[in-house]
């Protein structure tokens, strides 16, 4: 998993530059079910275990690494620097921004397992709520092949950039 090591080293380098903080990490690719897509656990001073999901990693490699590893690694930095801050609060967001080198954007793509298959869904909105749209449908919509209306409110659903 060269890509994973490469990306992890980049995150560590950025953390060292931005916060003068050197973290030790163990990566365990042992998440299986659909409950967790990534997890970060403190193991000691400056030591963290990051758990990743095997199937999602295999299916969505680069995207998954960029999204989920950055998310979990930011938790490690957060726990080290702001032990009492909220899990996805402003401190964590600030760290994600530093690591990404870009303003914080909530991910509008969801990774999940559906009957054991790794899947990605896209978050769409209408007047009455949210819809999780499959990659196949999302591609049809973005190529203007299909328009989908919400069955409840009748409005055309739109991909959200949060
Ligand atoms: Zn989180
Ligand atoms: Zn609706």
Image (cartoon, rainbow, N blue to C red):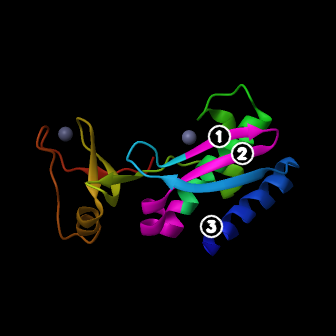
Q: Is residue 1 visible?
A: yes
Which tag, 1 or 2, sits closer to the chain's start?
Answer: 1
Q: Position of residue 45 (x, y in %)?
A: 82, 38
Between 94 and 82, the residue placed more toward the observer is 82
Q: Please state if 34 lies on the left or on the right of 46 as rendered.
A: left
Residue ID for mark 3:
4
Which tag, 1 or 3, sits closer to the chain's start?
Answer: 3
Q: Please state if 98 lies on the left or on the right of 32 as rendered.
A: right
Q: Position of residue 68 (x, y in %)?
A: 54, 53
Residue ID for mark 1:
41
Residue ID for mark 2:
48
Q: Position of residue 77 (x, y in %)?
A: 74, 43
CB-based contact (under 8 Å), mark 2 and mark 3: no
Asked if residue 57 is positioned above or below residue 85 in the image, the reply reads: below
Q: Residue furthest right?
A: 20
At mark 3, the secondary structure is helix
CB-based contact (under 8 Å), mark 1 and mark 2: yes
Q: Is residue 94 visible?
A: no
Residue sitting at 47 percent across and 49 percent down?
37
Q: Please state if 134 lies on the left or on the right of 100 as rendered.
A: left
Residue sitting at 85 percent across and 56 percent down?
17
Q: CA distance from mark 1 to mark 3?
A: 18 Å
Q: CA distance from mark 1 to mark 2?
A: 6 Å
Specify the segment rendered in magenta: 39-64
């Amino acid at each position: 998993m060269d890509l994973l090591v490469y990306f992890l080293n980049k995150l560590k380098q950025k953390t060292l530059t931005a916060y003068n903080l050197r973290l030790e990490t163990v990566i365990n690719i042992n998440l299986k079910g659909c409950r967790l897509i990534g997890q970060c656990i403190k193991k000691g001073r400056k030591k963290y275990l990051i758990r990743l999901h095997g199937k999602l990693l295999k299916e969505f490699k680069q995207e998954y690494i960029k999204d989920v590893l950055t998310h979990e690694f930011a938790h490690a930095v957060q726990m080290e620097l702001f032990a009492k801050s909220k899990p996805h609060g402003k401190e964590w967001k600030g760290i994600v921004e530093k690591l990404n080198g870009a303003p914080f954007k909530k991910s509008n793509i969801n990774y999940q397992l559906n009957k054991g298959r790794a899947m990605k869904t896209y978050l769409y909105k209408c007047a009455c709520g949210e819809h999780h749209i499959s990659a196949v449908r999302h591609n049809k919509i973005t190529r203007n092949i299909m328009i989908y209306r919400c069955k409840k409110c009748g409005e055309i659903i739109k991909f959200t950039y949060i």
